[in-house]
Image (cartoon, helix red, strand yellow):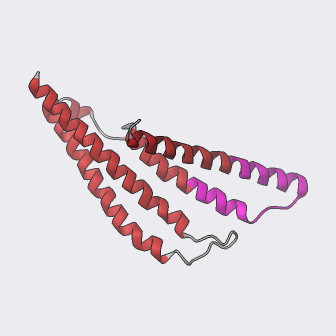
Amino acid sequence: MRLIDIVKKLVTWVCSFALALMAFIVFMQVINRNIVGGSFKWVEELSGMCMIWITFLGAALATTLNAHTRIELFVNLLPKLLSQSIFALGDLVCAVFSVALCYYSYPLIVANLHTMSPAMKLPLAINYIVFFISAFLICIFMILRSIEDFKGNDKQEEN
């Protein structure tokens, strides 16, 4: 099994765990409010953190599946070699954007290492580190996909 497949499985597992945890604690909060009449202060924070992690890691997973929105109608009308080159160039531009997101998210993480969340007293950097992780993964996945696109161009030229 390739390393990239292991990373995909790990990210899928983290997203699945976060979704299950969020569903469980929100369900528990609803039951607690309606039956006991009270509520937990930390549920909103933890469910928000789970949603942030699901969103950004899910974006990285969508990159592996080529599931992000892109306008392909006009590019697909071009000759195969040119359309593959345009898709590869678009993937590289997205990779550069992801590198910029990594670069600018790092100071945000460092600035929030000692800022604690109100209810759970966890560092708010937990919310921001996922920006860095997902942008890094997106960059890697985009570079790998653009390499595959360029390899597809080589195969077309050989045939």
| Residue 128 in the image, given as x and y percentages of width and height | 49, 65
Identify the residue at horizontal 32%, vertical 40% (top origin). Answer: 70
| Residue 61 in the image, given as x and y percentages of width and height | 44, 43
Identify the residue at horizontal 11%, vertical 21% (top origin). Answer: 159
Q: In this view, does 21 lie to the left or right of 87?
A: right
Work out which quarter of the rendered image holds the N terminus and state it. Answer: top left
Identify the residue at horizontal 61%, vertical 59% (top origin). Answer: 48
Front one among 150 and 59:
150
Identify the residue at horizontal 66%, vertical 50% (top origin). Answer: 22
| Residue 33 in the image, given as x and y percentages of width and height | 83, 56
Outermost residue on the right side: it is: 36
Choose top left, top right, bottom left or bottom right for residue 13. top right
Q: In this view, does 96 lie above or below 151?
A: below
Does any portion of residue 142 appear in the rendered image?
A: yes
Magenta segment, which residues?
Answer: 23-51
Q: In this view, does 89 lie to the left or right of 106?
A: left
